[in-house]
Image (tube, helix red, strand yellow):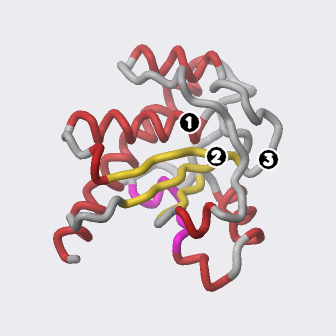
Amino acid sequence: MNSQRVRILFVCMGNICRSPTAEGVFRRLLAERQLEQQFEVDSAGTHDYHVGEPPDARSVAAARRRGIDLSGLRARMVDARDIERFDLILAMDAQNLEELRRRFEPSQHGRLALMMSYAIDAPTTGVPDPYYGGSQGFEDVLDLLEQAAEGLLQELLREGDRG
């Protein structure tokens, strides 16, 4: 990869379940491969429901069982500067992708994508919101995000090799 850091923002609705989990999963993957210095990673929500709050306790617990620490993260809302700051903004589902498209100029839409578009043979195009369900939903989110994060990293490394 080139010497410039790749900046990635993971986005869901409230930034307390899916997007902080995606951030944690991707950070762990980077740490395992000793690639932390090549990336800047953050997460945010399209809505301000939980600004300043830590991730949902169920997300924290599920991630902890897989060796991922989300405890230091705090929810924030996507802001207008994010489209300039980040190279790639990955929405957890189509609803949040559409919200991002509404907020940013069409010329900037090339930086927006669905997180699951990086998962090989994914059973779904979106990461389902586990907030109103049971604990299995948080495990399912982790399964999906681990698959997508691996595909994302492989794609970025391939692009870096070409660039």
In the displayed structure, 74 sits above or below 65; it is below
- Looking at the rendered structure, the secondary structure element under dot 2 is strand
Q: Residue furthest bottom?
A: 107
Tag 3 residue: 47
Q: Is residue 163 left or right of residue 51?
A: left
In the displayed structure, 160 sits above or below 37; it is below
Reply yes or no: does residue 115 show up in magenta. yes
- Looking at the rendered structure, the secondary structure element under dot 3 is loop
State the image coordinates of residue 104 (x, y, percent, origin top left). Answer: 70, 73
Q: Quadrant of residue 152?
A: bottom left
Mark-to-mark CA distance, 1 and 2: 8 Å
Q: Which mark is residue 109?
A: none
Q: Which residues are magenta?
A: 111-118
Tag 2 residue: 44
Q: Camera-side residue: 155 or 138? A: 155
Residue kind at label 1, given as amino acid type: Pro
Tag 1 residue: 20
Q: Residue at x 59, y 55 (%)?
A: 91
Mark-to-mark CA distance, 1 and 3: 14 Å
State the image coordinates of residue 97 (x, y, percent, origin top left). Answer: 66, 62
Q: Residue at x 54, y 20 (%)?
A: 71
Residue kind at label 3, given as amino acid type: His
State the image coordinates of residue 51 (x, y, percent, origin top left). Answer: 76, 36
Reply yes or no: does residue 129 show up in magenta. no
